[in-house]
């Protein structure tokens, strides 16, 4: 049984999707053992408490830079015996020391079909604003491993979502979360915990024989 550590900063909607999937038996061979928040005010902490999941706060405001923050985060992850780290709305740029220590053991969900609308500056509503500005007909979400390039790690799963007439960034954001993010993030976590993911170069391969 793998220890899943979820890093959060805000509301925790993706954390809730993971908790729901776990309680429905959709995450195999893994369990959320700790939620770590970069803010003491994150609503995600209340979600964890409600479901009896241990949580800790490592307040970013107490650190001068991301390097110092990452140093203590590394210590905390080691203490929690992290097998998989999930970034669920975690608004801190991880220092390369953590990424190297947990190579191909950190996953993130991004609200677009990478390589579209990703990289520096593409987060939250900005992603959906740009998709609507461009006039694309399909957007979606991507779950990927985290490497030292922003949104540049090996892609695990993607799911497309249609853009509809009259969409606002807020409406589109909600549809992408409901139809894509909340579905493929638990799927990717379960695949990892079942040892059904292999990374070669910058490609992630799924072992469908294990299904």
Image (cartoon, grey):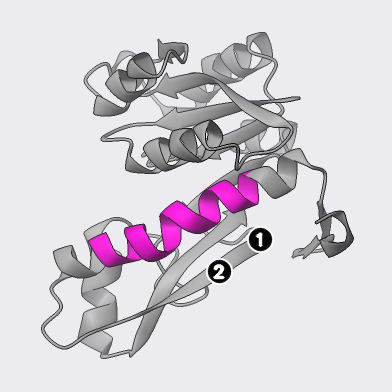
Write down the region rendered in magenta.
Answer: 174-189
Dominant SS of magenta comes to: helix
Q: Residue furthest right?
A: 209
Q: Which is nearer the eye, 168 or 62? A: 168
According to the image, label 1 marks what residue? 156
Please provide percent x and percent y for residue 187.
60, 52
Please provide percent x and percent y for residue 114.
51, 72
The residue shown at (48%, 56%) is 183
Label 2 secondary element: strand
Q: Based on the picture, tell me whether residue 13 belongs to the magenta stretch.
A: no
- Vertically, is 80 above or below 82? above
The residue shown at (46%, 15%) is 53
Q: Which quadrant: the N terminus?
A: top right
Residue 63 makes an appearance in the image: no
Q: How many marks?
A: 2
According to the image, label 2 marks what residue? 158
Residue 92 as seen in the image, left or right of residue 105: left
- Vertically, is 56 above or below 7? above
Please provide percent x and percent y for residue 79.
65, 8
Q: Based on the picture, tell me whether residue 182 belongs to the magenta stretch.
A: yes
The residue shown at (68%, 61%) is 154
Residue 1 as seen in the image, left or right of residue 99: right
Residue 83 makes an appearance in the image: yes
């Amino acid at each position: 049984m793998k220890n899943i550590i979820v890093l959060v900063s805000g509301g925790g909607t993706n954390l809730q999707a993971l908790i729901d999937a776990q309680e429905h038996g959709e995450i195999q061979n893994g369990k959320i053992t700790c939620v770590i928040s970069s803010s003491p005010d994150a609503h995600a902490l209340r979600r964890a408490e409600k479901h009896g999941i241990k949580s800790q706060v490592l307040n970013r405001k107490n650190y001068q830079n991301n390097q110092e923050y990452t140093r203590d985060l590394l210590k905390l992850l080691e203490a929690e015996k992290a097998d998989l780290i999930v970034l669920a709305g975690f608004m801190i740029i991880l220092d390369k020391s953590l990424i190297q220590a947990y190579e191909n053991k950190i996953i993130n969900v991004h609200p677009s079909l990478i390589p579209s609308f990703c990289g520096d500056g593409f987060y939250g509503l900005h992603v959906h604003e740009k998709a609507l500005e461009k006039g694309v007909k399909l957007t979606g979400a991507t779950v990927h491993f985290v490497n030292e390039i922003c949104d540049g790690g090996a892609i695990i799963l993607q799911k497309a979502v249609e853009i509809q007439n009259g969409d606002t960034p807020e409406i589109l954001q909600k549809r992408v979360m409901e139809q894509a993010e909340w579905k493929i993030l638990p799927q990717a976590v379960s695949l990892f915990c079942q040892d059904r993911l292999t990374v070669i170069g910058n490609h992630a391969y799924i072992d469908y024989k294990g299904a």
